[in-house]
Amino acid sequence: MLSIKSGRLSKPVKAVIYGLEGTGKSTLAAQTPNPLFLDTEGGTTYLDVNRIDQFTGWEGLLNTIEEVARDPSCCTTLVIDTADWAEQMAIKHICEKYKQTGLESFGFGKGYTYLAEEFARMLRACENVLASGRNVVIVAHARVRKQELPEEMGAFDHWELKLSRQCAPLLAEWPDLLLFVSYKTFVSGTESGSKKASGGKRVMYATHHPCWDAKNRFGLPGEMPFDYAGIAPVIGDEKNIRSITEPNEPIVVNSAEETPDKCKDVSDAPAQAAVSEPAKPDGTVPDIPAGIPQALRDLMQANNVTATDIQTAVSAKGYFPLGMEITDYPADFVNGCLIGAWDQLYQVILKERKDIPF
């Protein structure tokens, strides 16, 4: 007799958060509901969290995970921080067990086969925690690797989990949410012809890109501001696990593509509704070059804003040099910082107009 289920199943979330050191991965994981950290690298020293940071080797770490699975009262979310340090514990365990100086000493890649088997043991132990009704979050570092495509000329940087070639695919395939944390910058030209980087706000990526690995099974935006609110609808609190009777619709959160984090403070004053100035009789505004997106053109016409107004405001906030044409701005900057944050931008424009001496 077949046992067929329909709709969304009620289950905890398994997530992996990775990125460069110092990007706030552990801080983000600390905002999950009632977390217990298994601190393999000592990175939670300055976080106010429950932690276990003493293990009797690799077997001790696995035994601790199994103990968490047997004790539902100890936490709501188990956080392993970090995967790459846990991998080093596994390597040490294997070398001591087989009396080898390193994985290469085994020959024919046998040492790396043992490593993949041990890492899979850790993931199976995490599955037992999930089966007991708790979320599991694994934190990891990232590294960049040059990647070349056979059909393309040249190479590009690809960010990936800082693990061995045997363990990285296992961890990337395992979670429901693979989140890449990074800094987003805009590179623009200066009047002298050199390049200038600006911005540098932290963002989270939840979908795959040629330059990084990421995924999610919850309909999250591909890019989000670095804020726990972006993933709270997924992990949330003890009551976040969705009923199987809920409709299968994507979760709606504020996307960085809609209002990028770096644009939220585009105005020094609190955001106010844009106050329209009288438009010209023919409904047009001079100084709107061809090639400007229609959505931005409509906002400029409705508020009697010129291209020079926008260039002055953007330059005043330090994003791009004054002489840079709007049509040369990156598309995500136009969509997010100009169109998506128009009210804030308009306040800067009004302020800059007042500061112009006559």
Image: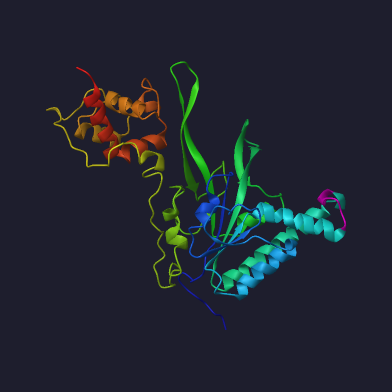
The image shows residue 73, relative to residue 286, as above or below, that is: below
The image shows residue 99, relative to residue 317, as above or below, that is: below
**Position of the C terminus by quadrant:** top left
Give the image quarter of residue 92.
bottom right
Query: Is residue 227 in view from this perspective?
Result: yes
Write the start and end of the magenta stretch as one range. Answer: 99-104
Query: Is residue 113 in view from this perspective?
Result: no
Which is nearer the eye, 62 or 152? 62
Left or right side of 293 for 229: right
**Position of the N terminus by quadrant:** bottom right
* Spot occupied by residue 33 in the image (x, y as percentages of width and height): 48, 64
* Spot occupied by residue 89 in the image (x, y as percentages of width and height): 73, 56
The image shows residue 285, relative to residue 78, as above or below, that is: above
Left or right side of 95 for 296: left
* Spot occupied by residue 264 in the image (x, y as percentages of width and height): 35, 41
Q: Main secondary structure of the magenta part?
A: loop
Which residue extends farthest bottom?
1
Left or right side of 239 for 79: right
Which residue extends farthest left?
281
* Spot occupied by residue 315 in the image (x, y as percentages of width and height): 36, 26
Give the image quarter of residue 20.
top right
Residue found at x 31% / y 25%: 312
Residue found at x 40% / y 26%: 320
Which is nearer the eye, 195 or 61? 61
Which is nearer the eye, 274 or 95? 95
Q: How many marks?
A: 0
Residue found at x 32% / y 33%: 293
Q: Is residue 292 magenta?
A: no
Report the colour scheme.
rainbow
